[in-house]
Image: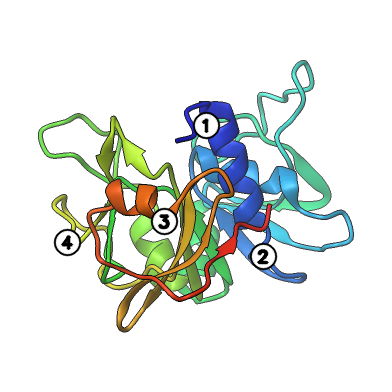
Amino acid sequence: MITDTKLIKAIIAKRVAKELKDGQLVNLGIGLPTLVANYIPKEYKITFQSENGMVGMGSTPKPGNEDSNIINAGGQFATVLPEGVFFDSSTSFGLIRGGHVDVTVLGALEVDQYGNLANWIVPEKMIAGMGGAMDLVTGAKTVIVAMQHTRKGKPKILKKCTLPLTAKGQVNLIVTELCVLEVTSEGLLLKEIHKDTTIDEIKSVTDADLIIPDKVKFMDI
């Protein structure tokens, strides 16, 4: 089991970056997903959107180079590329709801084997608001969940979500530090595993039923 939190986040972000294609418009959610921008090959032209009103977001700024006027949707310091633009929330959500976003990458509290997503509220706990996740997962062409495989040792990939849903049946791919899972009409297909884990370990920390092919590749990171 991988326990180093910094390493876990890097593994997930690097693997998600492999899914992105040249020319795409990609929304990166709050937290871990923002790290994906740090691992895009220089020869790729991928445009990142932040729903607070930015297209052309760059990688995370180096310590000491932060600009308090440039932040992402989670309030974290960000950078903007020379061709980047800023606009109001209505324009930003027009891009999202209009189906112009190719991929959205976001975290989750729970995902289940039917592609259902719960990531906006834990009942009876204070939240700042539901954010743009409901719009993003229904408006984007592809939805990738990037998250740690468990929380406090408990599975986050379930047979059925127990928390209030963000969206039903919208998740296409799940990337954790242990594996890559594709949501199919038959269930969750185990596509890749990390070289330092095993299929048995993944099964032991996953509540959902898994479809396991005869040959499973190691994660491409």
Q: Residue at image x 54%, y 59%?
A: 92
Q: Secondary structure at mark 3?
A: helix
Q: CA distance from mark 3 to mark 2?
A: 26 Å
| 67 displayed left or right of 128 | right
Q: CA distance from mark 3 to mark 1?
A: 37 Å
Q: Secondary structure at mark 2?
A: loop
Q: Badge 3 is on which residue?
A: 199
Which quadrant of the rendered structure holds the N terminus? top left
Q: Residue at image x 57%, y 74%?
A: 100
The crowding category of the residue bearing disc 1, from other C-alpha atoms within 10 Å (few below 14, some 14 to 19, many at least 20), is few
Q: Secondary structure at mark 4?
A: loop
Instruction: Judge depth for marks 3 and 2 and give the one in front.
Output: 3
Instruction: Judge depth for marks 4 and 1 and give the one in front.
Output: 4
The answer to which of 123 and 36 lies nearer the viewer is 36
Q: Badge 4 is on which residue?
A: 160
Amino acid marked by disc 3: Ile
Whichever of callouts 2 and 1 sits on the residue coming sooner in the sequence is: 2
